[in-house]
Image (cartoon, rainbow, N blue to C red):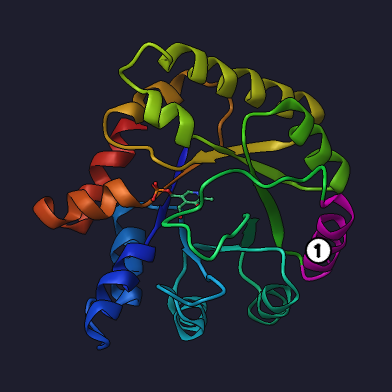
Amino acid sequence: MNLGVNIDHVATLRNARGGVEPSVLEAALICEMAGASAITVHLREDRRHIKDDDVLNLKKHLKANINLEMAATDEMQKIAMSVVPHSCCIVPEKRQELTTEGGLDVISKKDRIKELICALHSKNIIVSLFIDPDLDQIKAAHEAGSDYIELHTGTYSNAFGGEKQDIEFNKLKIAAEYAQSLGLKVNAGHGLNYENVALMNKIDGLCELNIGHSIVSRAIFVGLEMAVKEMIELI
Ligand code: PXP
């Protein structure tokens, strides 16, 4: 299983003082050196953390895959088609949310998502849809032509250690198996940390975990390289 490191929080810290440190590119290069297979950045409509220049800079200097998280808007489609990241993960986006709160509703936006996937495919960009472990949404993701789904692990992560842990874990396992049976490749992420990540090893065939908050938090104490290496060891 591969690790994609989400470095949005590095940009959040940088933006807190409006300067240039900590450098998003330097963080990405350290993650890459530590063994991350992908660097994930979410270019939000309000540019609250990652900026357009960050994406361009990463594209220019990084060997690891760039996974661009983005909403299914015309603006983001245009940027993705001009930057051409390795992959795009389509997420729902609400202006006021602290982080991506739920999975994408592929069913109700199927035509638009299909059109977006076609456009991204025309540039050989791999597409993933960030969705809850909901079998109907997975079916719709398949019908829309997605290559991957990224299962939203937020509810599982919040339930970890409590009475609903097994229920939420089983939803992810069943969802992953169903997606794979349709031919979709499966990633997972959101809320994963150094404790709850262990169970992800019990889901067969997961390709990549996308993890941000817990790695950047751990990096404050042990450094980013060690934080990434420790997570890779666990997965
Ligand atoms: N995957 C997706 C689609 C996300 O939106 C996020 C958060 O930006 C993550 C993974 C990483 O979540 P976390 O920061 O909780 O590890």
Check disc 1 and give the amino acid type: Leu
Above or below: residue 231 compared with residue 26: above
Total count of labels? 1
The residue depicted at 22 percent of the width and 56 percent of the height is 225
Q: Judging from the image, what secondary structure is the residue with disc 1 in?
A: helix
Can you tell which quarter of the image residue 197 is in? top left
Q: Is residue 109 visible?
A: yes
Q: Position of residue 208 (x, y in %)?
A: 51, 41
In the picture provided, is 221 more to the left or to the right than 98? left
In the picture provided, is 28 more to the left or to the right than 146? left
In the picture provided, is 179 more to the left or to the right than 2? right
Above or below: residue 108 compared with residue 185: below
Q: Position of residue 190 (x, y in %)?
A: 45, 43
The residue depicted at 47 percent of the width and 18 percent of the height is 202
Q: Position of residue 18 (x, y in %)?
A: 27, 87
Above or below: residue 4 compared with residue 65: above
Q: Is residue 183 magenta?
A: no
| Front in this rendered view, residue 115 or 226 | 115
Q: Residues within 10 Å of mark 1 (few under 14, many from 20)?
A: many
Q: Is residue 121 magenta?
A: yes
Instruction: State which quarter of the image contains the C terminus.
Output: top left
- Which segment is the magenta one? 109-123
The residue depicted at 78 percent of the width and 71 percent of the height is 123
Report which residue position mark 1 lands on. Answer: 116
Residue at the farthest left position: 221
Is the CB of mark 1 within 8 Å of ligand 1?
A: no
Magenta-colored segment: predominant secondary structure? helix
